[in-house]
Image: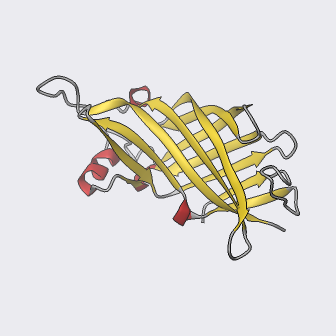
């Protein structure tokens, strides 16, 4: 399972923990890291990555992120179409044999409320690092039917793929291009809090 390390406030979302620091294990069956991009300029194609990992440090007093680092295995891209996924893994796009990982390193966190903020950092794709911002929503903390404490949070942001050398495209006969430049990034994470 993917592991995320977090410091959590007892009652940060109205739910108490017996420890001030906890390790989180991502529940893969209820989490997703994905993206959306325009196709033919008339619709959005969505995809996801099946393999990812990260470390998060959450300030238990100020309810802000001290660190948030993540790694995505680029070769695990999945848009539901095998031929398209192979193209995305090629040198036209991610060139996964040369650049196997997509990385995010947090630089700062701007708190808006106890459950919302802006995560700022650098994302590295194809060996090129650029700044990016993610809107963060901490969705809640609950105990599931087996008694395990779970926390859920959502991230969404946007990048221009050409900033990272993802330049492949084809012009359309009636104008426009096959693939849009702006790519929306999103993550829905549900994680199990491992208490000592």
Q: Position of residue 10 (x, y in %)?
A: 86, 54
Q: Is residue 58 above or below residue 78?
A: above
Residue 155 vs residue 85, the one in the foreground? 155
Q: Residue at x 80, y 53 (%)?
A: 14
Q: Is residue 30 above or below residue 134?
A: below
Q: Residue at x 55, y 51 (%)?
A: 188
Residue at far front of view: 14
Residue at far left of view: 173
Residue 11 vs residue 60, the one in the foreground? 11
Q: Is residue 143 above or below residue 110?
A: below
Q: Position of residue 90 (x, y in %)?
A: 31, 45
Q: Residue at x 82, y 43 (%)?
A: 59
| Quadrant position of the N terminus in the picture | bottom right
From this viewpoint, is residue 65 visible?
A: yes
Q: Position of residue 25 (x, y in %)?
A: 66, 63
Q: Position of residue 83 (x, y in %)?
A: 24, 53
From this viewpoint, is residue 168 visible?
A: no
Count of all numbered marks drawn on residues in the image: 0
Q: Can you tell which quarter of the image residue 156 is in?
A: top right
Colour scheme in the image? secondary structure
Residue at far bottom of view: 146
| Quadrant position of the C terminus in the picture | bottom right
Q: Residue at x 40, y 41 (%)?
A: 36
Along the horizontal axis of the image, is 31 left or right of 176?
Answer: right
């Amino acid at each position: 399972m993917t592991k995320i390390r977090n410091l959590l406030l007892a009652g940060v979302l109205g739910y108490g923990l017996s420890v001030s620091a906890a390790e989180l294990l991502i529940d893969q069956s209820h989490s997703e890291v994905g993206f959306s991009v325009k196709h033919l300029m008339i619709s959005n194609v969505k995809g996801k990555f099946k393999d990812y990992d990260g470390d998060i440090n959450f300030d238990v007093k100020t309810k802000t992120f001290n660190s948030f680092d993540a790694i995505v295995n680029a070769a695990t891209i999945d848009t539901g179409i095998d031929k398209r996924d192979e193209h995305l893994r090629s040198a036209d796009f991610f060139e996964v044999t040369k650049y196997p990982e997509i990385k995010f390193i947090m630089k700062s966190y701007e708190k808006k409320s106890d459950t919302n903020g802006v995560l700022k950092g650098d994302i590295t794709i194809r060996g090129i690092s650029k700044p990016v911002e993610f809107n963060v929503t901490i969705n809640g903390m609950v105990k599931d039917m087996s008694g395990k404490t779970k926390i859920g949070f959502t991230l969404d942001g946007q990048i221009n793929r050409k900033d990272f050398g993802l330049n492949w495209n084809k012009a359309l006969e009636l104008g426009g291009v096959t693939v849009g430049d702006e790519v929306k990034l999103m993550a829905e994470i549900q994680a199990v809090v491992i208490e000592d």
